Image (cartoon, rainbow, N blue to C red):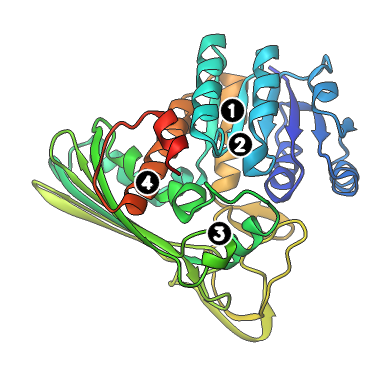
């Protein structure tokens, strides 16, 4: 089945997915939309797009469109998602569904009510090591899981780039924006267990001036007593060798353990020349040169001979296969995406009040207690 692909948002991630679409034979038509006309025109030229517009409605009305990717800024997802749902098109949504919990619930309900096949972009599920670990857990190779600990370290260029281009930073915390990836990974590996309580603490000595936290540490208790410790700090120096993300996960079971190091310290480049910026975003320039780089720590993957290789390629191409052949894929569902948002916001809520929070928490309560 041929795919007529509409991509709404032509920034860093939209550009990557558009380039990959041009490599996939079943994508027979490509349409683009972005409110920033120079960015739109450049990507349209680079990908030989069939159609380009600054209007979401105009793109989605095009008869060739059969599937949609929403890759706008995090706070601008709701409108294009709901417009695509009205057309019944399959959706790939960059996380989150929304930055507001009530709007996220509304988006989830709209998608499920319409019966639309929609997935959320949690790229790290497509790293081979995590897929292999997921299968080991399915096979029961360490018995019943009793505890999981997760630690994420991030270069501060992500919050610097993300928060300086928005006015309202209320829900743009390390957990909601970036910790959600490691939380999603852990909840995916803990599939079948439901969180019933979370207790967290935060600190903001470095990034408080941007309206966010430096880091948040928390512990979840699951319905079967399993413990899940989730820690993130995204205030590491701009010259930190990890381009973006460094993740460690430890899983202990009744008959064994799994230790995952995804810190990318196995391939290191040290050079007199500055290395590529750890984070690329429209209008953002790295504040300092990085002369040491952990190769592979940029979450989408790595460029070689003009092509991107890594988890974002796997994620995007498998979604195209899902559309054209119906193959089962490990993408996060929209229900996963909504749950992840509520759990990250519940951590922030617990840290703010300094007390454990019983789960689940209603979206309306989280909106009133950011």
Return the x and y of residue 329 as percentages of the image width and height. 47, 30
* Secondary structure category for the residue under label 3: loop
Query: Could you give the CA–CA distance between mark 3 and mark 2, rounded to whole angstroms?
Result: 37 Å
Q: Which mark is residue 211?
A: 3
Q: Name the residue carrying label 4.
A: 349
Residue 232 seen anywhere in this rendered image of the structure: no
Disc 1 vs disc 4: which is toward the camera?
Answer: 4
Q: Crowding at label 1, few (<14), some or many (≥20) Cα neighbours within 10 Å?
A: some
Disc 3 vs disc 1: which is toward the camera?
Answer: 3
The relative height of residue 124 versus residue 69 in the rendered view (above or below) is below
Q: Which mark is residue 321?
A: 1
Q: Residue at x 80, y 27 (%)?
A: 56
Disc 2 vs disc 4: which is toward the camera?
Answer: 4
Q: Crowding at label 4, few (<14), some or many (≥20) Cα neighbours within 10 Å?
A: many
Query: Could you give the CA–CA distance between mark 2 and mark 4, rounded to whole angstroms?
Result: 37 Å
Query: Could you give the CA–CA distance between mark 3 and mark 1, rounded to whole angstroms?
Result: 41 Å
Q: Are marks 2 and 1 in contact (CB under 8 Å)?
A: yes
Q: Earlier in the sequence, mark 3 or mark 1?
A: 3
Q: Crowding at label 3, few (<14), some or many (≥20) Cα neighbours within 10 Å?
A: some
Q: Name the residue carrying label 2.
A: 317
Q: Earlier in the sequence, mark 1 or mark 4?
A: 1
Q: Quadrant of the N terminus?
A: top right
Q: Are marks 1 and 4 in contact (CB under 8 Å)?
A: no
């Amino acid at each position: 089945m041929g795919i007529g692909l509409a991509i709404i948002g032509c920034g860093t991630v939209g550009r990557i997915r558009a380039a990959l679409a041009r490599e996939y034979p079943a994508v027979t038509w490509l349409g683009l939309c972005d409110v920033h006309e120079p960015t739109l025109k450049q990507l349209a030229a680079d990908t030989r797009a069939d159609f380009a517009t600054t209007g979401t409605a105009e793109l989605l009305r095009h008869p060739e469109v059969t599937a949609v990717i929403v890759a706008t800024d995090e706070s601008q997802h709701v409108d294009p998602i709901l417009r695509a749902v009205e057309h019944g098109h399959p959706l790939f949504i960059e996380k989150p569904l929304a930055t507001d919990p009530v709007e996220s619930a509304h988006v989830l309900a709209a998608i499920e009510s319409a019966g639309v096949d929609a997935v959320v972009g949690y790229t790290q599920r497509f790293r081979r090591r995590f897929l292999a670990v997921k299968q080991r857990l399915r096979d029961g190779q360490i018995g019943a899981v009793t505890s999981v600990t997760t630690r994420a370290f991030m270069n501060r260029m992500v919050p610097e780039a993300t928060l300086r281009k928005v006015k309202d930073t209320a829900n743009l915390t390390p957990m909601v924006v970036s910790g959600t990836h490691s939380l999603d990974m852990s909840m995916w590996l803990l599939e079948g267990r439901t969180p019933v309580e979370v207790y967290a603490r935060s600190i903001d000595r470095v990034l408080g001036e941007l309206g966010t936290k430096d880091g948040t540490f928390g512990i979840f208790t699951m319905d079967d007593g399993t413990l899940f410790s989730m820690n993130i700090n995204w205030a590491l120096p701009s010259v930190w060798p990890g381009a973006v993300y460094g993740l460690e996960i430890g899983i202990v079971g009744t008959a064994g353990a799994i230790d995952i190091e995804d810190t990318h310290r196995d391939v290191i480049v040290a050079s007199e020349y500055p290395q590529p910026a750890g984070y690329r975003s429209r209008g953002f320039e790295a504040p300092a040169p990085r002369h040491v780089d952990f190769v592979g720590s940029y979450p989408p993957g790595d460029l070689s001979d003009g092509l991107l290789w890594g988890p974002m390629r796997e994620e995007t191409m498998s979604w195209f296969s899902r559309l054209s052949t119906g193959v089962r894929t490990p993408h996060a569902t929209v229900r996963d995406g909504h749950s992840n948002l509520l759990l990250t916001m519940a951590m922030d809520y617990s840290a703010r009040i300094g007390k454990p929070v019983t789960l689940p928490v209603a979206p309306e309560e989280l909106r009133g207690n950011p």
